[in-house]
Amino acid sequence: MASPGSSAPGRVAVVGSGLIGRSWAMLFASGGFRVKLFDIEPRQVTDALVSLRKEMKTLELSGYLKGELGAEEQLSLISGCSDLREAVEGALHVQECVPENLELKRKLFAQLDKIADDHVVLSSSSSCLLPSKLFAGLAHVKQCLVAHPVNPPYYVPLVELVPHPETAPATVDRTYALMQRVGQSPVRLLREVDGFALNRLQYAVIAEAWRLVEEGVVSPGDLDLVMSDGLGLRYAFIGPLETMHLNAEGMLSYCDRYSEGMKRVLKTFGPIPEFSGVTAEKAMCVKVPDDAEHLAARRVWRDGCLMRLAQLKRQLPQ
């Protein structure tokens, strides 16, 4: 069986052919891996393959297709499958991408546990379900972990690797190497925590953004500008800890200078919002109506911006 670091990539199974599953399939194919894209509904697989072809051809024409292979070569590496055992057979890695439902995922991993060998990595795309709940009682628990991508994974490289308490270090190492091989930016969580790292940070920002709008401090449009034309520009290249370090004469200087102010402001933060009612209506983006056509068009625009930003970042010295 080929390993992620060998010269001849092996096979990967992607379980679930929705948006996340399709994105994973594109990523693995960009790294030269043969991909079995599984879905319990054959029609879903057929539709997914049609969608993949259209998207990858468009990416190639625009110069944003990842990997060294052309679109046709990458597409030839992806095949559909509606038999789970067939999809997993011979795979070095299984990436689960079914809806974010604990019982559904547990049922699927129980099936995978019965047909998996002792070498394949069983990985979930879950955004915040704890590995200790997802993989409890599995015989192959040492081979299990969460590899949480950021939506859309093809355009945003971060992947959080979150182990079960019994996950073997070699499982994390293999997955880390695999993610690097397909151009992603893996980060290791040393232990599981509810929401992982990304969503804990994201939810903290969302909660305060909601409170500022709900309390009439700032309009929804201006609130989004605070991030897109302010914090977001800086955070696209450096994180909050390095920002602190650079905004003074080092981290210790920053803490000495600003810690009292930070603690004072943090004490004024309110309770967790309900995320409903009038504020939910106010927070609707005026320039993007919430019908399917407008939302889809805006997502295409967003993905193009993310791809161009990612390309710029690759060109810059670290």
Image (cartoon, rainbow, N blue to C red):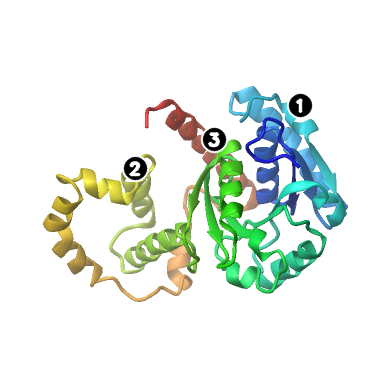
Q: Residue furthest left?
A: 257
Residue position for label 1: 72
Question: Residue 36, located in which quarter of the rendered image?
Answer: top right
| Element under disc 1 | helix
| Element under disc 2 | loop
* Amino acid type indicated by mark 2: Ile
Is residue 127 or residue 55 the one in the foreground? 127
Cα distance between the residues tagged 2 and 1: 36 Å
Q: Residue at x 39, y 66 (%)?
A: 207
Q: Point out the tag, 3 or 1, that comes first from the N-terminus.
A: 1
* Amino acid type indicated by mark 1: Glu
* Amino acid type indicated by mark 3: Gly
Q: Residue at x 67, y 29 (%)?
A: 58
Residue position for label 3: 304
Query: Visible in this render: residue 297?
Result: no
Q: Residues within 10 Å of mark 2 (few under 14, many from 20)?
A: few
Mark in the foreground, 3 or 1: 1
Residue position for label 2: 238
Cα distance between the residues tagged 3 and 1: 21 Å
Q: Residue at x 47, y 52 (%)?
A: 286
Q: Point out the tag, 2 or 3, that comes first from the N-terminus.
A: 2
